[in-house]
Image: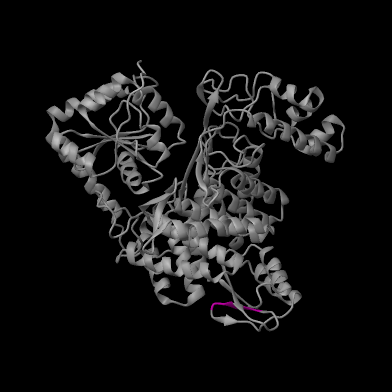
Amino acid sequence: MSNNPVSSNHLINEKSPYLLQHAHNPVDWYPWGKVAFDKAQHEGKPVLLSIGYSTCHWCHVMAHESFEDQEIAKVINEHFIAIKVDREERPDIDHIYMTATTSMTGQGGWPLTVFLTPQGDAFYGGTYFPPYAKWGSVGFVDLLESIAKAWRSDRENILSSSLSITESLRRHAQASPSSETMDATFMDRAFRQMRGQFDPANGGFGGAPKFPMGHNLSFLLRYHKRHPSTEALSMVEKTLTAMSHGGIWDHLGGGFHRYSTDARWHVPHFEKMLYDQALLSRAYVEAYQVTGSTHYAQVAKGILNYLLDGMTDTEGGFYSAQDADSMEAGGHLIEGAFYVFSKTEIEEVLGKENAEVFNYCYGVMPMGNADFDPHGEFKGKNILYQAHSFEDTSIKFQKNEDEIQDMIAQAKLKLSALRDQRPRPFLDNKVLCDWNGLMIASLAIAGRVLGEPRYIEAASKSADFILEKMMSQSRLLHRWRDGEAGIQATLEDYAFFIDGLLELYESSFQEKYFKAAQRLADVMIESFSDPSGGFFMTARDAEDLIIRPKEVYDGAIPSGNSVAALILLKLYALTNNDAYQLHVEALFKCFAASVAQASWGHAFLLSALDWHLNGPLEITLQGAGDDPVIAKMLKVLYKQFIPSKVVKLIPGTGKAQVRVCFQGTCRMPIGTVDLFEQEIMQWTDKQF
């Protein structure tokens, strides 16, 4: 294949790191927009739409194999108008065409490859295609030529088929109120479905590949609180423990990789996504509250410390992702090259005796330990995982456990220093409002539960950054990078960021965050609400796409509607504004039929339903924010797992006191820490 360098294409002035990665392809890429579609209509050509993201391994593979190849680019440029989209910048476009592709093929993923009419209607789609046929997949070159031929000879049928697909998508997006009522049976059904998919040997759900899905674990913790006799907690504990011991956890630098390619969490897909760090740190903190296990607290800190050390912009925003691939000797991008070690490397750095201890603890083998390695990428290399506990290691080497832990800690420092000398994986340094909202919420929760003020400070800095730099005329913007904010915000941006602001208010009692949450919630209702119930993904004045999506299904992150339900319930409890409650009731009614079909796929919405059905505990503190009595009361409160609650502070100069209310009934004010602890324990005992 020819890979001669070429001049830049139409992506050269974009902000997206993903689009810029393709700006020098010989493919004549256009960004999504009117220019590209006008050209397609003028020239009578179909559109090749390629959607991916900068840290996507198979996106890199397809780019190298096909989009960098002169001959393949020639075929594309002759027969198609080529459009590149960063799915993280334009989740609305990605959602529409991913839904279209899964409806046509039964599966989806990235890179997403979709063929469109000049009007934007999809007529064929898939994911990764090798340049030539292999692994039972059609070759990309053959596919391009076949599509081009069909466009010339059978265009009318293609146009008719594409319109039918669009109409089907439109019907799917028009969820309307049903006669079904969402009640506690929906949560029972979801739990049974999760239990049926649970892997009792390795934790997690289903087989390989296995995804973390932190919001599912958070739902199970809430279900356990209502139903402590079920297996919900043991499912969560098995999963969280297995993940933290497996190769999906970065044992040197902290943070979780995207997913495991095998069932036992050993061989990860090595990219690290911001949203996974947010959702998983939240689940580990909640598990710490439920169980008191300091292991979960330490894992949560490991996630958040990784985030603050390497994923934070100097202005306060959090970066989006870190790539799976990095450069190996010879100049080749190899997945996981930054993270894996040969046994010889470890011995050279640690010395024989210390290496023997470390290798026993972390499963290092002379020939490598990646036994599930279908492409031979990790031959002779080791993916670190906790093969033996510190206790077992201490017995094996006849040393006390403290000595073993100290040896392991020193070994990790030395191996981290070695690793830091390697070429680092690519860092996608764009700041996304929605993912930052998830992270702000998790940092705020972790800060108050774990007693780490710096987490709250980091959350505040990110929130201030978004409020100052990622807004235009009282409206949120979706993406910031390289000094510039842009792209109209989606429902997820509003819902996730509002949730972050509300959690931050509870952790800091800074009124500005509560007021900002109210303002943005009102904008969200005005701009995204559907009179039939629920919220559209895009605003009323957003770009006119082939459909206006309205989704409640949780994917790798919760749906915008799920989080919108929860934040409106919180705001109703804090303000008594009935409008918030009415929108939530309409949302539940709108999506009841959809949720009934696959309850387990709507875990975050069911967490909101749990709040809705049982009502929150309302805790009102009165006194100076820095009063030591209030600080002690809050410490008592956050030792307990009470997910359905709101906490507010009424500033004052008198004696500190707290009032607890539930379902319209308030208890007498409490002025001592001991009495408050007794009160809170009563609610814990009631499985609240």
User: Where, quadrant-wise, is the C terminus in this rendering?
Assistant: bottom right
Residue 580: image location, x then y, percent: 42, 71
From the viewer's perspective, is 587 left or right of 504?
left
164 or 669, nearer to the observer: 669
Q: Secondary structure of the magenta portion, mostly?
A: strand
> Does residue 662 show up magenta in the picture?
yes
From the viewer's perspective, is 151 left or right of 59?
left
In this rendering, the answer to whether 206 lies above or below 173 is: above
Residue at image coords 80%, 28%? 354
Q: Which residues are magenta?
A: 658-663
Residue at image coords 28%, 59%? 541
Residue 494: image location, x then y, percent: 42, 59
Residue 168: image location, x then y, percent: 25, 47
In this rendering, the answer to whether 95 lies above or below 568 is: above
513 or 362, nearer to the observer: 513
> Does residue 434 show up magenta in the picture?
no
Residue 144: image location, x then y, percent: 25, 25
- The type of colouring in the image is one colour
Residue at image coords 71%, 67%? 636
From the viewer's perspective, is 23 left or right of 686?
left
Please indicate, yes or no, whether residue 219 appears anywhere in the rendered image: no
Residue at image coords 57%, 57%? 459
Please indicate, yes or no, whether residue 66 appears anywhere in the rendered image: yes
In this rendering, the answer to whether 370 lies above or below 450 is: above
User: Where, quadrant-wise, is the N terminus in this rendering?
Assistant: top left
